[in-house]
Amino acid sequence: MAEVIVLGEDPSDSIAEVGEFFERRNGGFVISDRLLPRVRTYSADGSFEAAFGRFGDGPWEFRTIRDVAEVADGRIAVTGAQNGAVTYLTPDLTPHSMLLIEDFTSSMLLPFERDFVFTGRARDVNMVAEMDGIFHRLVGSAVTWSSWNTLAASKPYWNALGGLHGAVGGDSVYVMAGLLYPATILNASGDSVGSIGTPSPDFRRVPELQRGALAFTAGEGAAVQTGIVIKELIESFDLVTGMDVVDDDYLVFTVGRHDPAKPWFPFKQLDVSVEAYNRHTGEKLFENVPLPEGSKVLGGGGYLYVLLDAEIPPWRIAKYELLPL
């Protein structure tokens, strides 16, 4: 049985929807609000500790929170500022500093050694063709390498139907597109040193479509027919909705599907099951382990954290411990 914790709340500052999650080294965690520009910290038992954030385009303000993480020195890093800066907060969520990474806007944050690896795009559209990859290594305030691209980016509609995932374990960075197996393993220098992951036999791969296949055409009947085609499409395939390192030894994939009740953008992804690998050897340890209906995998760390009843407060998080290898 998993331990279940209930998030404490400030009645005057309630969570609208649980967003990005990161387990802290002290056993607590930091969570963003998916709908509000707020970041909150909690102790290991779910007690509310502190909150920070307001909507805006100025310093210490956010349009939306893209990611949160705790870096090596204990500061909380947040992305989502309009200017693309990484916002650093102290452990108790008071303003510390802001870092504007030259030439990039940042999104996903993966703490790595003293700094982090991040996903980001070039500020200048003319730089896009010159970029060597989607994931970038930050050391101090400088990007030291860019690495890894995905075939999914060249497929019609795949950018909308899937997403990118990343995780860090030891001196390895694991990256993948949610529509494609396997995950790629990068070393500390950004070099591809192998891959990991084999889908279960019943994993349904996304079909390849021709550009324009889902375009709306004139007339109410044609629009309805296009909607039916899109609904049938998103019901027809599976995807990886998350990737996490748990207890340092496990690489866990969350397998999901699109919600057929939301057959148009923004699509809603449902977490269905998990599978795990020994990240050192690549051995698959288990697959098709079902998740509680309506739940969402938040992230890894010492445990695999799963939000139960992901759309209904009170917000309850199950901590699953994976058995030693």
Image (spheres, rainbow, N blue to C red):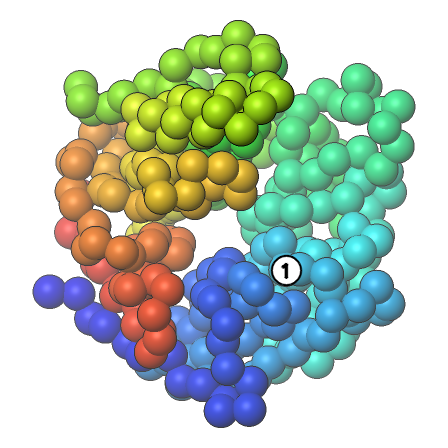
Q: Can residue 30 be spotted in the picture?
A: no
Outermost residue toward the bottom in this view: 11
| Residue sitting at x 30%, y 72% | 316
Above or below, 108 relative to 277: below
Q: Position of residue 13 (x, y in %)?
A: 56, 85
Disc 1 marks which residue?
65
Q: Quadrant of residue 325?
A: top left
| Residue sitting at x 88%, y 32% | 124
Above or below, 53 relative to 303: below
For the residue marked with disc 1, what is the amino acid? Ile
Q: Position of residue 290 (x, y in %)?
A: 16, 45
Q: Position of residue 206 (x, y in %)?
A: 38, 19
Above or below, 301 relative to 55: above
55, 283: nearer the viewer: 55
User: Is 127 on the left or on the right of 252, as rendered?
Assistant: right
Q: Quadrant of residue 292?
A: bottom left
User: Is 215 on the left or on the right of 241, as rendered?
Assistant: right
Q: Residues within 10 Å of mark 1 (few under 14, many from 20)?
A: many
315, 281: nearer the viewer: 315
Which part of the image, by quadrant, shows the N terminus? bottom left
Please count the marks in the image.
1
Q: Position of residue 22 (x, y in %)?
A: 48, 61
Q: Does dot 1 land on a helix, a strand or a loop?
A: loop
Outermost residue toward the top in this view: 210
| Residue sitting at x 66%, y 51% | 115
Q: Can residue 118 be spotted in the picture?
A: yes
| Residue sitting at x 22%, y 27% | 283
